[in-house]
Amino acid sequence: MADVKEARSGQKKDASVTEITPQSEDFSRWYLDVVRRAELADYTEVKGCMAIRPYGYAIWELIQQGLDRRFKATGHVNAYFPLFIPASLLMKEKEHVAGFAPQVAWVTRGGDEELAEPLIVRPTSEVIIGTLYAKWIQSWRDLPVLINQWANVVRWEKVTRPFLRTTEFLWQEGHTAHETEAEAQEETLKILALYKEFAETELAMPVIDGQKSESEKFAGASRTYSIEALMGDGRALQAGTSHNLGQNFAKAFEIQFQGRDKTVQHVWTTSWGVSTRLFGAVIMTHGDDSGLILPPRVAPYQVVIVPIPRGNWQETVLPKARELQAQLVAAGVRVMLDDRDAYTPGWKFAEWEMRGVPLRMEIGPKDIEKGQVMVARRDTREKSSLPFDGIGDTAVRLLTEIQQALYHRALKFREDHTQRVTSYEEFKSVMEGRPGFVLAAWCGREECEASIKADTQATVRNIPFGSQRVTRSCVKCGRDASVEAWFAKSY
Amino acid sequence: MADVKEARSGQKKDASVTEITPQSEDFSRWYLDVVRRAELADYTEVKGCMAIRPYGYAIWELIQQGLDRRFKATGHVNAYFPLFIPASLLMKEKEHVAGFAPQVAWVTRGGDEELAEPLIVRPTSEVIIGTLYAKWIQSWRDLPVLINQWANVVRWEKVTRPFLRTTEFLWQEGHTAHETEAEAQEETLKILALYKEFAETELAMPVIDGQKSESEKFAGASRTYSIEALMGDGRALQAGTSHNLGQNFAKAFEIQFQGRDKTVQHVWTTSWGVSTRLFGAVIMTHGDDSGLILPPRVAPYQVVIVPIPRGNWQETVLPKARELQAQLVAAGVRVMLDDRDAYTPGWKFAEWEMRGVPLRMEIGPKDIEKGQVMVARRDTREKSSLPFDGIGDTAVRLLTEIQQALYHRALKFREDHTQRVTSYEEFKSVMEGRPGFVLAAWCGREECEASIKADTQATVRNIPFGSQRVTRSCVKCGRDASVEAWFAKSY
């Protein structure tokens, strides 16, 4: 196979494919390089707004499908609410307005007319949905209302980064209303568990779940819960939140119903969301210096086939490559056959590696002779010749293996970067060195939380379930600790 | 079956279900009643903006899936572009700005800052996409670019109506770039044909396809094509448009590429879209005085099962109803088992009829005894007892029949309301009487088009393909007619 190898390795790689800053040199630069080189997103002429390019959007579609299927399986339905919200509505819930008013975009003119009351572009939809739920809900028979919306939202951001923080972003926001406080709490935690299972199963991304501190909870919520993932640079990323809103919005918007006992009561509401940010998390959890590494379940192409152009390859190799493609498609695999003439195999190898395709299959005259396909894994870079026969099943098995391997690699990385500390000195030294999650006892006072942040940049990510039973001393002030909390520097 | 019949017919119907204005009394009022009663959409506190309720959104999701599948099968990919557009970009294509500037919403403030340059909320995305295509396209190798976007857009409308004309609406907009004029024209017509096939196959809605007149073409297009459907009141509705943009936007945004011959050239672009308006068309094509009639392919529930509560029905009837449901689901049918205790069968019959579910299946003790199910068709209101055995296949067959019957009924209605006229008197008398489509020779001058509109409210809907070969006299002025055109009063 010497000649084939030569053909495969002797290609001059295109500079545009390989120019990615190494992670160790500058992780943030690496991230931006990957987003641009892999054609996931692009900057636009609108400050802070990105365009999501087809390859990036295809990943988002797979994320959407995986979530939407889970929402529907748990009894939720989709709906759509207006983009614009009268400014006066935002003002009705006092904590909510304080949290969001500073970062909204204002529409003050429509066509030729100045608006009597300006509209805001939704930063989130609790208030507009609140006005409708007040109309739609009359009786306990109308409950629960379990609605989700896929939409764009806008938050006026000063510093932006593709997928992680953009002025406009895409997300889903669930808004539910319940008869009792217990049901609302059950829903809040059910969704948090759904997010965790989704992130771990589909994105191969381990997350820690727990409750947010007072200072980090959603504006207007009674309790906020989150899932948090650890990125390749040791910083945490909030990947999804689920809020128990109590009766705060129900009271602000008079969402009332006649109960089973005929009394008029306020409903109990929840809201919850994940956004295109999840996609940024995928990039930073799995990627390496060659670019993106996609978990097979959210890879637009799970296999790329590169035919090796020897001799009259379009008559010999290409038909076999098409047969290979057909077998993979029949096995339910998403395949790209890269039969472009204008690019060399070497260029294609680097290109699809950079774009994170989990498996590459090379097929040339020698492979065909032997009834084999050369298969390269993106995650381990292992290459092996595998029999053409039964390649569909082989691919499915390998993709399952890769999905699991990525999860376990990310889990091991997180475990290697997680430490329980008992002294503040230890806390600070971890944050100065190789950062990650630190689990530490905390008195629960905002004062200590703020000092820790000022000293180390680390914030409370969330408080693990059941941690209330711990009796220790606050890592900062030494007072009795009410909880243990996860701390980390974060995105 | 006397006792069962009694149970089924003796119910007092809830006024809220039956209060729909008859079509003959006021078609427009009928439409609004159906939208509200069937919980398709609701007004909100934002002028001209609607909320699409879960039942309406489920229909929209089926419409989306049917279109998205077709776009992908023809090589298109999805992407996402920013909601906001700097006002200066809109100004770059002079016809485009003239068409859209009067109806855009303006964002003038973000957070606490007044914007140096106001942003408009996209009314359509040619200009923002143009700036990106100029970056992304360098060589003929990058062509064609075949991108679609699912998004919300905003047009500041004075008079609005749910689904048909709203300030914000949901749509898809395709934006493609090509190497040659011929390819762009081929794409434009390919999509028009795709829209027609979609409307006829999925929505059971016959449409006429053709080219728009100069005065009705898209602002900035070289040529606009449309599909037009006839509503139940004899007015036409534009259900989709496909534009050949020539090099107009390519020149305004400098979208250039190096050709196969090494010369630098401008690309040729197209754009095309359908919106939530399609859904309004479905309502007005098929509905009757009892409410909505949904074509099975876009019905969220294709079958509703109503168990008849006799005796200890929850132990006897309900298990059999569940078995029925399972058989239908296994046959790939979308089913709702309405086992709610709080409503009577009579109320449920009227409710689901009003919501347009194609098939209702009633099952009570007597039906079970006989191994039968009572099946009622929404379109013909025929009721028949059918064997429980093989009910899955029976349902699939009936749904296919209903889909076709609805198409043929709508086609017949259109044919009955289509007339070729040769004199202007005839033209006017048709438009005064039972309106519909009129096919008439036209000189092609805007002057005649405007006079006809002033006299009759009818506008040129589109010009059928191949009609250029006709040699007749203009129905209005008597000059040589260059074309025949479809005229109608329209939404």
Image (cartoon, coloured by chain):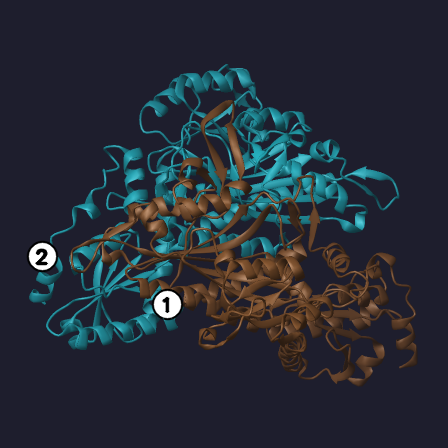
Chain colours: A brown, B cyan
Residue name at image x 33 percent, y 50 percent: A250
Residue B62 drawn above or below residue B335: above
Which SS class for mark 2? loop
Specify the label residue A186 is tagged with: 1
Q: Amino acid at mark 2?
A: Gly
Query: Looking at the image, which residue is at 55% across and 35% down?
Result: B123
**What residue does disc 2 label?**
B10
As shown in the figure, which amino acid type bears the numbered disc 1? Glu
Q: Chain of mark 1?
A: A
Eye-nearest disc, 1 or 2? 1
- Position of residue A59 relative to residue B443, above or below, is below
For the N terminus of chain B, which image quadrant?
bottom left
Q: List x then y, in percent, for residue A402.
A: 66, 77
Instruction: Give the vertical position of B437 relative to B52 (above or below).
Output: above
Report the side of B207 relative to A413 (left or right). left
Image spot of residue B455 (x, y percent): 41, 16
In the displayed structure, does residue B230 sit left or right of residue B2? Answer: right
Q: Position of residue B444 (x, y in %)?
A: 56, 22
In space, the residues marked 1 and 2 are separated at their CA atoms by 41 Å
Is A235 rendered above or below residue A379? above
Q: Give the percent coordinates (x, y) of residue A254.
A: 29, 46
Q: Is residue A417 visible?
A: yes
Q: Quadrant of residue A329?
A: bottom right
* Number of residues whose C-alpha sits closer than 10 Å to that of mark 1, classed few (under 14), some (14–19) or many (20 or more): some
Of all residues shown, which one is farthest toward the front? Answer: A478
Q: Residue at x 74, y 58 (%)?
A: A28
Query: Residue A458, labelled with which disc?
Result: none
